[in-house]
Image: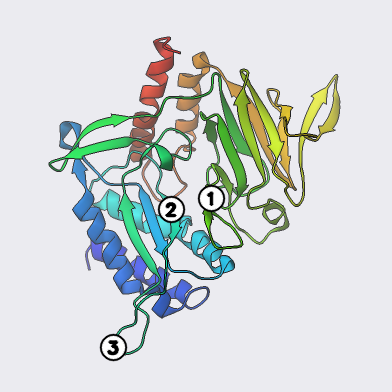
């Protein structure tokens, strides 16, 4: 068995294992799911400068109607590093590249799935790999691609909407990204990236998302907990009717104070504030243009800009350096 076959078999075994817990075999159809994922990688790969081959980084999962709790379980499985590691391994084994992190989007399909002649469902989870667009950018830094004749002809980054930028970092909770750079005017924070209403509608995804783990800290974060809004050159934290509340821990004259947003205007964040969402803590700090190159080099050296999976440092640095290169150049040229 060669390396590619081992990766395919490994992902299939992973899906078989989860189908015995959260999902039924008929719902998931592990063999067909694996086939669809890797066939799409091959059919949607594109070349760019120096004939380097890139593949889409968004896994768009279409799900037939089911319970909200099941949808949340599905998101946990298909946004996990255990799932992603097989996709990354396949990409690396074929010497392909990514512009940004893999991430999963979920949408609900209308109706019910059809059945086979044996009476089994044909599967409830249909994956589709997609190139990112401006609506699917979790941090404002995803590449937007125009592709013609199987080649990438242009890669851009959305214009940053904040100045300065700001950086979030979780202290005691498990988040999908350990370092999150705020570049948009509205940044939603909550538990899970995809947020579902009680009517099984997909709401606007969270930007900074905590994983759906069973520990008390992560469970204290609501599905849509708070929002950071940039206006008047300041960042304001607002609570969104969360279950366990939102507050800021700030040291003033050597004394620690807790400040809760009291109205719709929110409270202005100060550099090095600690944001408390329920029992989850994360740091907030301003990032000024002159700091960006140094910050990126530091985070790259620590391996923070890519998921912590089995992937060599050179590959992580190459992908991440490309991701931030235009942003750094943008600031250095004084275009803001």
Instruction: Please give the label number shown on residue 193.
Output: 1
Assess disc 1: are there few (<14), some (14-19) or many (≥20) residues with their C-alpha within 10 Å of its C-alpha. Answer: many
Q: Position of residue 16 (x, y in %)?
A: 41, 75
Tell whether label 1 touches label 2 (CB within 8 Å).
yes
Give me the disc on residue 224. none
State the residue position of label 3: 117
Among numbered discs 2 and 1, the one appearing first in the sequence: 2
The front one of 15 and 194 is 194
Q: Position of residue 208 (x, y in %)?
A: 56, 42
Percent x, y of residue 198: 61, 62
- Render colour scheme: rainbow
Residue 284's image quarter? top right
* Left or right side of 297 for 321: left
Task: Name the residue rendered at 50%, 16% in the picture.
Answer: 289
Dot 3 or dot 2, earlier in sequence: 2
Give coordinates of residue 316: x percent, y percent: 38, 39
Viewer-nearest residue: 336 or 2: 336
């Amino acid at each position: 068995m060669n390396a590619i076959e081992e990766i395919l078999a490994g992902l299939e075994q992973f899906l078989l294992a989860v189908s015995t817990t959260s999902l039924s075999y008929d719902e998931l159809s592990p063999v067909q799911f694996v086939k669809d994922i890797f066939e799409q990688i091959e059919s949607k790969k594109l070349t760019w400068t120096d004939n380097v081959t890139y593949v889409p980084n968004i896994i768009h999962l279409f799900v037939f109607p089911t319970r909200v709790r099941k949808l949340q379980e599905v998101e946990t499985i298909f946004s996990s590093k255990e799932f992603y590691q097989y996709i990354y391994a396949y990409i690396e084994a074929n010497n392909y590249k990514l512009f940004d992190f893999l991430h999963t989007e979920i949408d609900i399909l209308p109706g019910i799935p059809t059945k086979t002649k044996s009476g089994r469902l044909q599967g409830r989870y249909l994956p589709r790999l997609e190139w990112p667009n401006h609506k699917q950018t979790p941090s404002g830094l995803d590449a937007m691609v125009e592709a013609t004749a199987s080649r990438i002809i242009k890669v851009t980054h959305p214009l940053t909407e904040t100045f300065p930028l700001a950086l979030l970092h979780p202290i005691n909770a498990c988040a999908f990204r350990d370092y999150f750079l705020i570049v948009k005017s509205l940044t939603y924070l909550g538990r899970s990236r995809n947020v579902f209403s009680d009517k099984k509608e997909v709401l606007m995804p969270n930007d900074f998302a905590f994983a759906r783990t069973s520990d008390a800290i992560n469970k204290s974060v609501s599905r849509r907990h708070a929002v950071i809004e940039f206006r008047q050159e300041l960042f304001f934290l607002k609570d969104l009717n969360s279950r366990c509340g939102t507050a800021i821990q700030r040291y003033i004259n050597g004394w620690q104070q807790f400040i809760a947003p009291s109205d719709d205007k929110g409270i202005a964040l100060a550099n090095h504030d600690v944001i408390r969402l329920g029992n989850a803590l994360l740091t907030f700090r301003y990032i000024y243009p002159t700091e960006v190159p140094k910050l990126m080099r530091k985070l790259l050296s620590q391996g923070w800009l890519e998921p912590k999976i089995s992937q060599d440092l050179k590959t992580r640095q190459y992908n991440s350096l490309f991701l931030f290169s235009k942003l750094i150049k943008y600031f250095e040229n004084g275009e803001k």
